[in-house]
Image: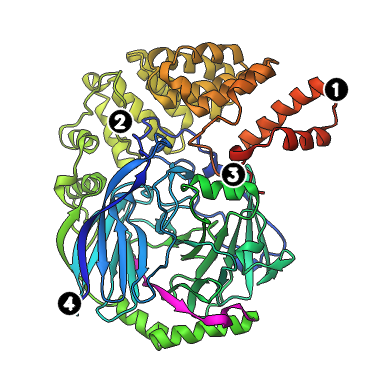
Amino acid sequence: MSECYSSAYICPGAELGKVNPLPDIKNISYIHAGIEMTQAVPEDCRQYINQGMISTLLPYQQQDGYNRSRQHKVFHSVVLENGFLKAVFLPELGGRLWSLYDKTARRELLYCNPVFQPANLALRNAWFSGGVEFNISVKGHNPLTCEPLFAQKIRLPDGSEGLRMYEYERIRGVLYSIDAWIPEKSRFLYIRPKIENRTGRDIWMYWWSNIAVPCHRHTRVLVPAQNTFINYFGNDHYVLDYAGHPDALGTDISYPENIPRSLDFFYHIPDEAQKWIAAVDESGYGLLQCSTPELKGRKLFVWGQGEGGKNWNRYLSDGSNSGYIEIQAGMVRTQLEHIPMPSGATWSFLESYGAIDCGVEAHGEWPAAQAAAERQITDSFGSLSDTLNKAKQQKATAGEMLSFGSGWGVLEEYRRKELGLPGLSDEIRLPLGALGEAQKQWLVLLYEGYLPERNADEEPMGYVTEAFWRRRLENSVKQPQNRNWYALMHLGVMEYAAGNPEKALEYFMESGSVLPNAWSFRNIAMIYRNELNDFEKAYEYMQKAFGLNKTCRGILVDTAVTCLAARKNREWLADYEQIGSFQSDGRLKFYCAEALMALGDYEEAAEYLNQELVMPDIKEGDTAISDTWFRLYGKLISDRTGITDSAQLHQLVEEQYPLGQLDFRTC
């Protein structure tokens, strides 16, 4: 009989750190990247490209407090196991399927990262590589990928034990769940996600399961497609192209080792074809993922064979392995689109994960390799559609709670009850004990009509952005006794999230006048800097925030960026001298190097920007370090030699001052 049980999972890991208390005020360039399509992209595939995108990550906050100092950490895991498979899930890290072990072959099927190392690759910044990440709602990784989910046991009709994980996703306002189980005699793990739209309106929706697998020499990705979208990312926008598969870019792109740079390949699987993807090694053995037709998309992501891509693989782990690629499955053709989900709809689908062994045929001509995989699928499932659809319909009975998620869904249930609205789900009941202090402050507003004031030295707690809360708070502050700095600051955040930066600015200004506070002054500065392009005003208010708070890293980073934007380079260097232990922060040291270069002091800048620099939150796709490096060391070489030709200087920097571990270029 298959089992579900809790277990400790121990591995070296960095601290995730605390959440940045500052709201996103057009501060996340990832969200705002444009999309360019070439003429090769079929017209009938363009409908939802660039649809459903968001303008801010609010109500979420950035998770940028992590480091690179790894100690042994104990994670709460939930294990599903039968005689053939052992699956390890990490509910406290977004419900990640961390390991899938084939007991018969005695081999790990996933890329099971030997460490937990967050880095800046997601919408909310923190992300980590390995396992299977279940992404809902918006492009840019699940907002909850580094957050705990609720977890409880379930039981299937055949007596098999399974796992259910669930949470309330706050951008789209939906409850989603993931049921996982391994039938007693099965060699495959079943995953059944479900999304319930009880918002009362049509919303945009998104789902991609991101599956990390080891990247060996001669790894090949098999998929039932003859064409692929090819997605490039630059500093500020995406370029989407279209080509035949697997012969594209002058090589056989079914072999990741042939791909020179970081790229996404979104496979164009015909509607009538079975939906599957596999990554196999030199012998033809590897992981198979297949699904019901709702997951029409499949994807390959590679870091590429350049030094920057290899560095990213090492940076996300401990350098002890050959790295990973991702094979993925999603609701749409590409990850540059969302699809409309009607009000009241419930969507569910079934995925299956297990071993495939195609033998040497996996490395034959493309049609023969595809056929070999299809035969293995038939041997394993019979009729794939019949088997998976039957499994999808099975009812599960909820049982013992294993771990808790956040209280935001509970807060939403209280709001719905107050208004006489139906709950978030017909099946799932959120535990009332999950309410935390961040949610309880809003319950006071809900039931007592005011938002409790906090000490201005304390960090703000939990933002909410729904129109209901904005109206409730607007009515509250009509009473003079409720019009405190904290309520006004939150109203500013709500107005900004609603697309009203001018109104937000008014509230932030009033908040700062009622009681000077770093949080409102910083928000004022961000609107002047990021929305109004008034860098002098942004600098003025950022200095007010800095004067009131030098212990919040987010304020220090915003101070540095604002100073540089306003060309207040000496002022940033003076501020840097006041920040104590934060002087060791790699990003802040990098900003010192930029300030010194602007002032013409390249020798001193090199003391900050050198091979010893460690920037834990260097961003995927951001070439700031390499661009600044070549300017800095190119100038030093030019001053020493008199050479002024930019191409020659670039080559000399490559030879004399190699980026080494700081090379994160992926193109």
Q: CA distance from mark 1 to mark 3?
A: 33 Å
The structure's colour scheme is rainbow
- Which residue type carries mark 2? Glu
Residue in front for this viewpoint, 484 or 385: 385
Please say whether residue 355 is one of the residues in the magenta stretch. yes
Say if 549 sits above or below 37 in the image: above
Residue 348, by quadrant, is bottom left
Q: Verify CB contact (< 8 Å) between mark 3 and mark 4.
A: no
Residue in front for this viewpoint, 518 or 120: 120
Label 1 belongs to which residue?
Answer: 642
Label 2 belongs to which residue?
Answer: 474
- Which residue type carries mark 3? Gly
Label 3 belongs to which residue?
Answer: 621
- Which residue type carries mark 4? Gly
Q: Residue at x 23, y 38 (%)?
A: 439
Q: What segment is highlighted magenta in the picture? A: 346-364
Q: Earlier in the sequence, mark 3 or mark 2?
A: 2
Please say whether residue 42 is one of the residues in the magenta stretch. no
Q: Residues within 10 Å of mark 1 (few under 14, many from 20)?
A: few
Task: Indicate left or right for 575 with 176 as reference.
Answer: right
Task: Indicate left or right for 464 with 112 as reference.
Answer: left
Looking at the rendered structure, the secondary structure element under dot 2 is: helix
Q: Nearer the viewer, mark 3 or mark 2?
A: 3
Q: Earlier in the sequence, mark 1 or mark 3?
A: 3
Image coordinates for residue 218, horizontal then vertical, percent: 60, 68
Q: CA distance from mark 3 to mark 2?
A: 40 Å
Q: Residues within 10 Å of mark 3 (few under 14, many from 20)?
A: some
Q: CA distance from mark 1 to mark 2?
A: 64 Å
Q: Residue at x 59, y 44 (%)?
A: 621
Looking at the rendered structure, the secondary structure element under dot 4 is: loop
Looking at the rendered structure, the secondary structure element under dot 3 is: loop
- Total numbered labels placed on residues in the image: 4
